[in-house]
């Protein structure tokens, strides 16, 4: 049994920076006051990472692709019982369909959180950059959802970490090491994920592009009102 590259470097870097920034966004929001500026910054960085991951899920290496772990209901329930993560089904050497579902849920609800944040205000000094496009009542409503949705995020992340601990303790499977170093040792041969310099350079370009998109959105200016014609 030879170690096989499953998680390419960009996916691993995505994971650990995403986790660190999500925690930092939470801590800075709870600190409030002057820390809100860092809350915004963390939120923008999470936004850029999410855009990157969206494209990486379509065009990235084998196991990072959504199509590698998103299945129809039939395969989903069949593999649930078959425990494909035991290393016997090379198709799911990355995320299992159940694990994949939790990945999608996290990406989706973090995406919702960021978009709501852009329209949120704290009634004192801090307006999200898109608040100027909507009225105060709408912003207050979206702020309410931003505050409520953070409980969904806490639940999803808690479930995520508990699942990893469950695998480690009950199933004697270490998922953390492959998310750090990239390789898994499997019972059946699987095709490795591409992780060469081209892949990595492509990811870097994508991250730069994603950051530029976020920058544009954050700096959107209201349309200039048409000048009255005399
Ligand atoms: C990973 C993304 C984000 C997470 C996890 C997150 C989380 C939170 C949390 C937990 C709070 C509530 C703090 C409290 O209990 O008082 C909060 C408040 C807030 N967030 Fe975010 N947030 C994110 C992104 C953003 C973004 C991108 C913006 C805007 C650019 C934003 C703007 C705000 C504002 C204005 C508040 C204050 C709301 C109030 O005090 O009523 N957030 N956020
Ligand atoms: C705020 C905290 C966290 C968030 C938001 C988060 C989010 C995610 C996401 C989105 C993925 C999917 C990766 C991808 O396919 O791109 C993932 C996978 C993973 N995460 Fe986390 N994570 C967090 C904390 C942690 C922690 C603390 C650990 C270690 C104890 C961890 C270990 C893993 C592992 C091992 C995987 C791969 C799971 C598998 O093999 O299917 N994560 N996480």
Image (cartoon, rainbow, N blue to C red):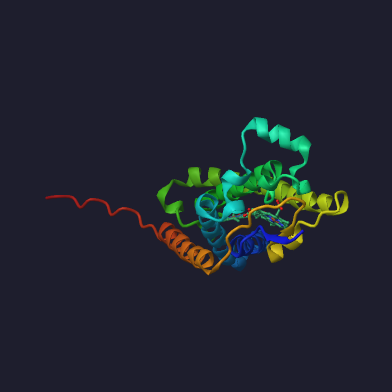
Percent position (x, y) of residue 214? 46, 59
Q: Quick one: quadrant of the N terminus? A: bottom right
Viewer-nearest residue: 47 or 67: 67
Q: Horizontally, is 2 left or right of 213 in the view?
A: right
Q: Is residue 109 left or right of residue 176?
A: left
Q: Residue at x 58, y 63 (%)?
A: 195
Q: Quadrant of residue 82?
A: top right
**Residue drawn at (40%, 60%) of the image:** 216
Quarter containing ligand 1?
Answer: bottom right
- Please name whichever residue, 199 or 227, is drawn nearer the observer in this view of the structure: 199
Tell which residue pokes out farthest to the left in this image: 230
Residue extending farthest to the top is 74
Percent across and percent down for residue 176 are 75, 60
Query: How many numbered callouts?
Result: 0
Q: Is residue 28 visible?
A: no
> Residue at the location (51% across, 49% down)?
58
- Rendering coords of residue 139 (x, y %): 50, 47
Q: Is residue 109 above or below residue 77?
A: below
Q: Where 66 sits versus 32, above or below?
A: above
Q: Nearer the viewer, residue 190 or 182?
A: 190
Closest to the observer: 1 or 85? Answer: 1
Percent x, y of residue 9: 61, 65
Does 63 sit left or right of 56 as displayed?
A: right
Residue 204 appears in view? yes
């Amino acid at each position: 049994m030879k170690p096989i590259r499953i998680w390419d470097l960009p996916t691993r870097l995505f994971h650990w920076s995403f986790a660190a920034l999500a925690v930092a966004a939470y801590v800075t929001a709870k600190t409030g006051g002057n820390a809100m500026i860092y809350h915004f910054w963390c939120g923008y960085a999470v936004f850029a990472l999410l855009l990157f991951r969206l494209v990486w899920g379509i065009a990235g290496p084998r196991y990072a692709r959504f199509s590698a772990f998103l299945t129809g209901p039939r395969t989903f329930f069949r593999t649930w019982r078959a425990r494909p993560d035991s290393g016997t089904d090379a198709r799911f050497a990355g995320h299992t369909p159940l694990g994949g579902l939790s990945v999608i849920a996290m990406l989706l609800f973090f995406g919702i959180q960021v978009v709501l944040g852009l329209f949120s205000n704290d009634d004192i000094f801090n307006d999200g950059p898109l608040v100027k496009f909507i009225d105060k009542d709408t912003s207050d409503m979206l702020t309410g959802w931003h505050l409520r949705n953070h409980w969904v995020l806490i639940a999803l992340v808690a479930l995520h970490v508990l699942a990893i601990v469950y695998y480690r303790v009950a199933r004697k499977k270490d998922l953390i090491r492959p998310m750090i170093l990239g390789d898994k040792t499997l019972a059946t041969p699987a095709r490795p994920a591409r992780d060469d310099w081209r892949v990595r350079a492509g990811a870097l370009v994508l991250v730069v592009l994603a950051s530029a998109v976020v920058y544009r959105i954050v700096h959107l200016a209201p349309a200039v009102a048409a000048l009255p014609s005399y």
